[in-house]
Image: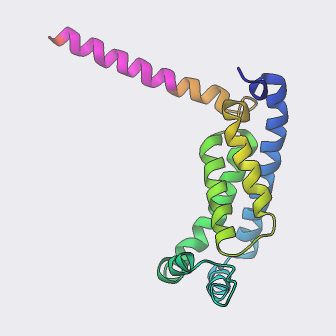
């Protein structure tokens, strides 16, 4: 076991993971409560793609113009809902790795759209926690849920193998 994966150090990772989860949860709740319309954000990002030093690269502006803006109603739902789910997952340590990946992906997209704000910090924390592996969820529900899921599929595979060998 690496030094950053022991149970004492993993308590620090849990505190950081929970902090990150609170950031996501608060952002998602704010968007759900106050209403969220990504069209203004996306339009501004598209406008930031021109000029000598564009904040948004041309390929990403093309994604915004041809995919995100035409489907803004979908983004208006999945962004706040995704933020809430990421936050809850990180706070309780359930589906931690998928939540970290989804959060990092969202932060990356916000940065690609020209928004700095706290995105680089949240992105960096998510990547750091991903590198800690199982230590990021040692103090969370995944510590118990993941072995149960593994045992379920292992037992199912064993029963299937036994049933097949008995029929031959």
Q: Main secondary structure of the magenta part?
A: helix
Dividing the picture into quadrants, the one containing residue 106 is bottom right
Can you name the residue that lies furthest to the left here?
168
Q: Identify the image quadrant of the N terminus.
A: top right
Residue 162 located left or right of residue 129: left
Q: Position of residue 164 (x, y in %)?
A: 22, 16
Question: Taking 55 as reference, is 80 above or below it?
Answer: above
- Residue in view at x 73 percent, y 73 percent: 115
Q: Position of residue 3 (x, y in %)?
A: 78, 24
Between 122 and 39, which is closer to the camera in this rendering?
Answer: 122
Number of marks in the image?
A: 0
Q: Identify the image quadrant of the C terminus.
A: top left
Can you name the residue that lies furthest to the front here?
52
Question: Taking 102 as reference, is 141 above or below it?
Answer: above
- Residue in view at x 58 percent, y 65 percent: 78
> Is the image coloured rainbow, by chain, by secondary structure, or in one colour?
rainbow
Between 128 and 82, which is closer to the camera in this rendering?
Answer: 128
- Residue in view at x 78 percent, y 29 percent: 4
Residue 162 located left or right of residue 123: left
Magenta stretch, residue numbers: 150-166
Q: Position of residue 134 (x, y in %)?
A: 67, 30
Asked if residue 109 lies in the magenta stretch, the reply is no
Q: Position of residue 75 (x, y in %)?
A: 57, 72
Residue 157 located left or right of residue 139: left
Asked if residue 154 lies in the magenta stretch, the reply is yes
Dividing the picture into quadrants, the one containing residue 145 is top right
Residue 65 located left or right of residue 125: left
């Amino acid at each position: 076991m690496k030094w950053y994966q022991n149970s004492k150090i993993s308590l620090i990772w849990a505190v950081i993971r929970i902090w990150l989860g609170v950031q996501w949860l608060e952002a998602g709740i704010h968007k759900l409560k106050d209403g969220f319309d990504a069209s203004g954000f996306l339009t501004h990002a598209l406008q930031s793609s021109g000029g000598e030093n564009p904040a948004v690269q041309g390929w990403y502006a093309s994604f915004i113009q041809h995919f995100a803006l035409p489907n803004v109603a979908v983004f208006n739902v999945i962004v706040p809902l995704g933020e809430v789910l990421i936050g809850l997952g990180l706070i309780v340590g359930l589906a931690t790795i998928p939540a970290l990946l989804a959060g990092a992906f969202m932060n990356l997209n916000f940065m690609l759209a020209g928004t700095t704000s706290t995105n680089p910090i949240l992105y960096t924390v998510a990547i750091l926690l991903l590198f800690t592996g199982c230590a990021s969820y040692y103090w969370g529900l995944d510590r118990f849920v993941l072995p149960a899921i593994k045992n379920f599929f292992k037992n199912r595979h064993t029963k299937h193998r036994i049933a097949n060998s008995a029929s031959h």
